[in-house]
Image (cartoon, helix red, strand yellow):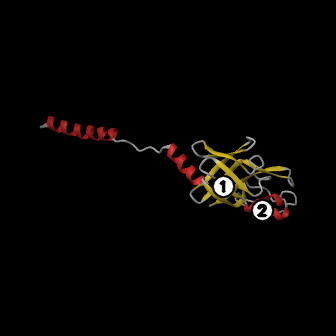
Amino acid sequence: MKKNTKTFFSLLLIIPAFLIASCKKEETKTEDLATTKKGWVTGTWKQKDLVLAYPIPNPFGGPDFPVGYSLYNLAPYLPITGPGITCSADNIYAFDSTGNFTITGCTELILPDAGNSGKWNLQVYGSALHLVSTDNKDTPLWINNINSTDMKLGSLSFTIHFAEFGADIPVYILLEK
C-alpha cells in the first residue's frame, strides 16, 4: 500500500510538470505590431497641437510651463518663433500605403529637414517614424503614442529652435485622423 501511495504522489507531481512544459506559450510578434502601426500611420492626419515635451521656465514670470503646454498659447508672445508655430496649426499630414508622404502647410520651423514631401517608413519595431525628404534628409520622430485616430510624435531629442530664448526646446506633435 505504501508503494502505491508513493507512486500515486510521484505521478501527481510529475504529470503537471509535463503539462506545463508541453503547453505552447503565445508570443507577441513584433512583426504584427509593426504592421498594425503601419496601418494606423497610413492615412490623413491633421495637426491637433504642438506641445512642450519638457518643462521650461516662464520667461514672463510666474509658474513654469509644464510638459504638454500648448505652444499655440505661447505663440502670440513670441515675435520671431510665434508666426512659425501659428502657421503650422493647420498642417495636414498624408501617409500613403506605398511609403510616400506629403505635408500641406508650414514645415519650416517644426520639420525643416522633412520638407513637404518624400518617403516615410517605420523602424525600431514600428516605434520610430522616419520622414525622408526628396533631397534624402532623414527626420526620425519617435512615436510616443498611436492608435487608429490619434498619434503623438516627438521625443526629448526632437526640438524647435526658439530665437527669443536662443534655445532648442523639445516638443511633441499631436495629430488626429
Which residue is identified by label 1? 94
Residue lying furthest front: 98
Helix, strand or loop for disc 1: strand
Viewer-proximal residue among 58 and 51: 51
Helix, strand or loop for disc 2: loop
Q: Residue at x 34, y 42 (%)?
A: 23
Q: Is residue 43 left or right of residue 88?
A: left
Q: Is residue 144 left or right of residue 31?
A: right
Which x, y percent locates residue 102?
Answer: 70, 53
Q: Is residue 38 left or right of residue 134?
A: left
Q: Residue at x 80, y 52 (%)?
A: 108
Q: Amino acid at mark 1?
A: Ala
Q: Amino acid at mark 2?
A: Pro
Mark 1 crowdedness (10 Å alpha carbons): few <14, some 14-19, many ≥20: some
Which x, y percent locates residue 51?
Answer: 72, 58
Which residue is identified by label 2? 63
Quick check: can you spot residue 52? no
Viewer-proximal residue among 156 and 137: 137
Q: Quadrant of the N terminus?
A: top left
Q: Is residue 113 left or right of residue 45?
A: right
